[in-house]
Amino acid sequence: MATSYFRDNVVVSKHHGEAVFYIKEKSKPDKIEKYIVEPYLNSRRIKDFKIETVKPNVSAVKVGNKVYKLDD
């Protein structure tokens, strides 16, 4: 699943009760955790999560067989 917070795109991958959020290094993780991560965890009843940061020059993230864009 891909979502955005202002100009920052966020990719969410859920596997066996754990969610992984992919964000760019320039993103503000505290704001994304407050407005994207916490509501997602509450709505899906997920307890474990981690936030993975990717380099600014990365334009997409491949999760499984799908490719999700991190750029606009």
Image: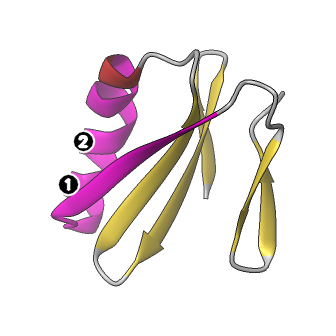
Q: Amino acid at mark 2?
A: Glu
Q: Which residue is mark 1?
A: 42
Front one among 32 and 52: 52
Residue 10: which quarter of the image? top right
Q: Secondary structure at mark 2?
A: helix
Name which residue lies at 44% across and 16% down: 28
How crowded pointer 1 is (Cα within 10 Å; few <14, some 14-19, many 20+) is rated as few
Confirm whether the magenta stretch covers residue 2: no
- Per the image, the residue denoted by label 2 is 38
**Range of the magenta residues?**
31-54
- As helix, strand or loop, the secondary structure at mark 1 comes to helix
Q: Is residue 61 left or right of residue 40?
A: right
Residue 61 % position (x, y):
73, 53
What residue sits 56% from the left and 35% below the top? 23
Disc tally is 2
In the depicted structure, whether residue 8 falls above or below residue 33: above
Q: How is the image coloured?
A: secondary structure
Amino acid found under the numbered disc labelled 1 = Asn
Tell me the CA gap for discs 2 and 1. Answer: 6 Å
Whether the magenta-drawn stretch holds residue 51 is answered as yes
Cβ atoms under marks 2 and 1 closer than 8 Å: yes
7 above or below 46?
above
Q: Which residue sits at x=79%, y=71%?
A: 66
Q: Quadrant of the C terminus?
A: top right
**Quarter of the figure that contains the N terminus:** bottom right
Tell me the residue at 30%/20% (across/down): 30
Residue 56 at what x, y percent from top left?
Answer: 72, 24
Residue 20 position in % (x across, y down): 43, 57
Where is residue 15? Give x, y as percent.
Answer: 42, 78
Bin the neighbour count of mark 2 within 10 Å (Cα to Cα): few under 14, some 14-19, many 20 and up.
few
